[in-house]
């Protein structure tokens, strides 16, 4: 990653991790040298017995109301959001379910998400520009994906890490 783009990525990650109080990642310049890539902070954020029933029943609800509030402090107010399945019905249920969004804590969480989103869009636009420049020089596009280490989500502790993606054998 080129110098300026890497700095923007670090800036976006720092914004999310420091202002959002991310517990699962350490950003460059915040606990590790600024010239290193981010580091996952391995902890048991969710116990297996909590995970399986809730996640398998409703993955979106699990992520919104359980996992994200635990790994990102600014999102703790999302624990109080009623399950989206309770929003069906008369307008009174929708009205009462939205009350949580009027709290001071939720307003701060939403403001933080808006700021983080703006940083992510800025970084993404610059990443796109750099990718176009690289392709214009005749280099092939490279794409891929990423997932958190399995123990970050499942809390599998000291087990041997497995590959994080199917595109290569060296991801851990």
Image (cartoon, rainbow, N blue to C red):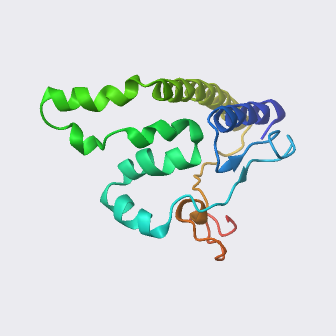
The residue at the far left in this view is 90
Image point (57%, 27%), residue name: 112
Left or right: 87 in relation to 75: left
Image point (64%, 35%), residue name: 16
Residue 45, image x, y percentages = 56, 58
Question: In this orientation, does residue 137 appear?
Answer: yes
Image quadrant where residue 44 sits: bottom right
Total marks shown come to 0
Question: In this orientation, does residue 164 appear?
Answer: no
Q: Quadrant of the N terminus?
A: top right
Left or right: 95 in relation to 172: left
- The residue lying toward the viewer, choosing from 153 and 166, is 153
- The residue lying toward the viewer, choosing from 8 and 43, is 43
- The residue lying toward the viewer, choosing from 139 and 55, is 55
Residue 18, image x, y percentages = 69, 35
Image point (83%, 39%), residue name: 29
Residue 157, image x, y percentages = 63, 71
Image point (83%, 46%), residue name: 32
- The residue lying toward the viewer, choosing from 68 and 35, is 68
Residue 129, image x, y percentages = 66, 28
The residue at the far bottom in this view is 159
Relative to 42, residue 79 above or below: above
Relative to 129, residue 45 above or below: below
Relative to 152, residue 17 above or below: above
Q: Quadrant of the C terminus?
A: bottom right
Left or right: 166 in relation to 5: left
């Amino acid at each position: 990653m080129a110098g300026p783009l890497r700095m923007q990525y670090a800036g976006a990650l720092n914004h999310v991790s420091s202002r959002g109080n991310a517990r699962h990642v350490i950003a460059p310049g915040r606990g590790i040298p600024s010239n290193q890539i981010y580091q996952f902070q391995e902890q048991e954020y969710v116990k297996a017995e909590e995970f399986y029933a809730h996640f398998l029943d409703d993955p979106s609800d699990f992520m919104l109301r359980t996992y994200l509030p635990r790994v990102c402090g600014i999102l703790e107010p999302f624990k109080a959001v009623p399950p989206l399945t309770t929003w069906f019905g008369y307008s009174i249920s929708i009205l009462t379910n939205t009350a949580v969004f009027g709290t001071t804590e939720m307003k701060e969480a939403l403001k933080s998400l808006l700021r983080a989103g703006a940083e992510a869009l800025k970084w993404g636009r610059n990443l796109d520009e750099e990718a176009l420049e690289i392709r214009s020089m005749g280099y092939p596009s490279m794409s891929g994906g990423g997932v958190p280490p399995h123990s970050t989500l499942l809390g599998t502790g000291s087990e041997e890490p497995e590959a994080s993606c199917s595109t290569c054998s060296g991801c851990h």
